[in-house]
Every structure is written in structure tokens, then in C-alpha cells.
Image: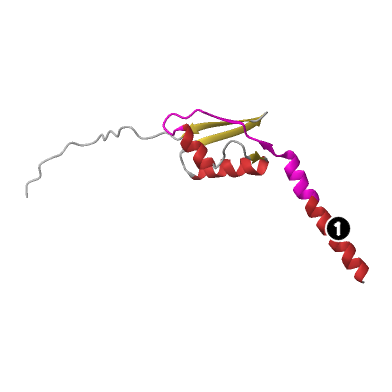
Amino acid sequence: MYRINSMFRFYIILSIILIIFTNSINAENITKIHVLGNERVSDKTIILFSELDTDISVDSLTINDAIQKLYETNFFQDINISFNEGVLKIEVVENPIVQSIIINGIKKKNIKE
């Protein structure tokens, strides 16, 4: 009984170590961040909201979290993040803004009681 428990613990610990090691193998460091497609929101603001920065390790989970955080701002209707050889590229399409409102209808009438 004791031997089965110790073997089970060993396999659990080994599995956890392998999962951590596998995630760290796929992670790469960001050397540059390029932001494309933004007109109103500044590059620094987008990087700040994504919580990404240079010289940090990035993997697919980190990129998914960054995309989710950017969508939560409600500034963008489309976000695409790609990572290639240390360069992280964030492409955004901003939500349109209302610049003017035109109201058409019946002009004011004087009503006498």
C-alpha cells in the first residue's frame, strides 16, 4: 500500500515538472513591440492595457490573456497579436466613434391653448 502511494506521488510530481518545463520551452522573450492600426489610442496605452512589455517571456497563454484584456477595454472591434523572432506585433481595428448627430423631423410648432 505504501509503495503504491509513493509511486503515485512520484508520477504526479513528475507530471507537474514536465508541464512546467514544456511551458518554459515554448516561451520566448519579447525584444520589440510594434502596434499597428491605431488612430486615437496611443501605442503606449495599448501596450499598457495588454500588460505586455519587452524582456518578458511570452507564450500562447500570455498572448491570449493580452487579447482578452484589450477586448475588455471596448476600444477595439478586432485585435490580432503575432509573435515572430522576438518581435511582438499588435494589430488593432478601433471601434468607430460618433462624430456628429443629425436629427431630422418636424420643426417646432407654437401651440396655443
Specify whether residue 27 is painted magenta: yes
> Front-most of 111 and 2?
2
| 95 sits to left or right of 113 | right
Relative to 19, residue 55 above or below: above
Q: Which residue is mark 1?
A: 11
- The residue sitting at the bottom extreme is 1
Asked whether residue 11 is in view, the answer is yes
Figure check: 6 above or below 79:
below
**SS category of the residue bearing label 1:** helix
Q: Residue at x 91, y 66 (%)?
A: 4
Is 103 situated left or right of 71 in this image?
Answer: left
Q: Is residue 67 left or right of residue 10?
A: left
Q: Quadrant of the N terminus?
A: bottom right
Kind of residue sitting beneath label 1 = Tyr
Percent from the top left, x then y, of residue 88? 60, 32
- For the residue pair 2 and 89, the one nearer the viewer reads as 2
x and y percentages locating residue 104 in the rendered image:
25, 34
x then y, percent, for residue 57: 65, 40
Compared with 73, 7 (above or below) is below
What is the quadrant of residue 34 in the picture?
Answer: top right
Task: Name the residue rendered at 73%, 43% in the picture.
Answer: 24
Q: Is residue 2 magenta?
A: no
Residue situated in front as seen by the camera: 44 or 76? 44
Q: Which residues are magenta?
A: 18-42
